[in-house]
Image (spheres, rainbow, N blue to C red):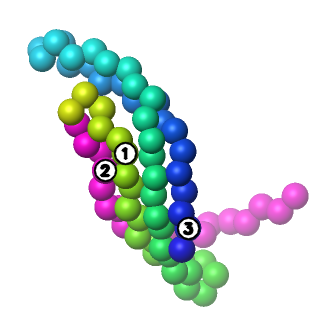
Amino acid sequence: MVLRAGPYYGKVRDDSLGINDKHIGLNGNVSLGLVFSRRYYLEARYDYFSELEGYDFSGFSIYAGMKVFSLKL
C-alpha cells in the first residue's frame, strides 16, 4: 500500500460557459497493488483532488499490466 500527496496545477477553460480558471490545488491518493510471478501486476487506486471551478476530479481506478523488459543501471 502506498500513500502519496502533493500539489497539482489545474486549468479549466470552457468558452460556452465563460469559465477560464487556473488553480494550484491538493492531490492525495492511496494505492494497493499485487504482483504475480514478478511479471504481471494489478493495482487499485483512489485519487482525491481539491475542487477546481466547481468540478471534482476525484475517482477510483484499476490498472493491470505486464512487465515487458527490465533495465538496470
Q: Reading the chain from its start, which is encountered first: label 3 or label 2?
A: 3
SS at badge 2: loop
Residue at coordinates 37% horizontally, 45% vertically from top-left? 49
Q: What is the x, y in percent for residue 69?
A: 68, 65
Q: Quadrant of the C terminus?
A: bottom right
Q: Which residue is mark 3?
A: 2
- Provide the residue span drawn in magenta: 55-73
Going by the numbered disc 2, the residue's amino acid type is Ser
Q: Which residue is mark 2?
A: 58
Q: Which residue is mark 1?
A: 49
* Mark 2–mark 1 CB contact (< 8 Å): yes
Is 37 above or below relative to 1?
Answer: below
Residue 41 visible somewhere in the drawing: no
Left or right of 60? Residue 23 is right
Residue at coordinates 60% horizontally, 87% vertically from top-left? 37
Q: What is the x, y in percent for residue 48?
A: 37, 52
Is 24 above or below relative to 4?
Answer: above
Q: Does the magenta segment cover residue 6?
A: no
Local packing at callout 1 (Cα closer than 10 Å; few below 14, some 14-19, many 20+) is many
Going by the numbered disc 3, the residue's amino acid type is Val
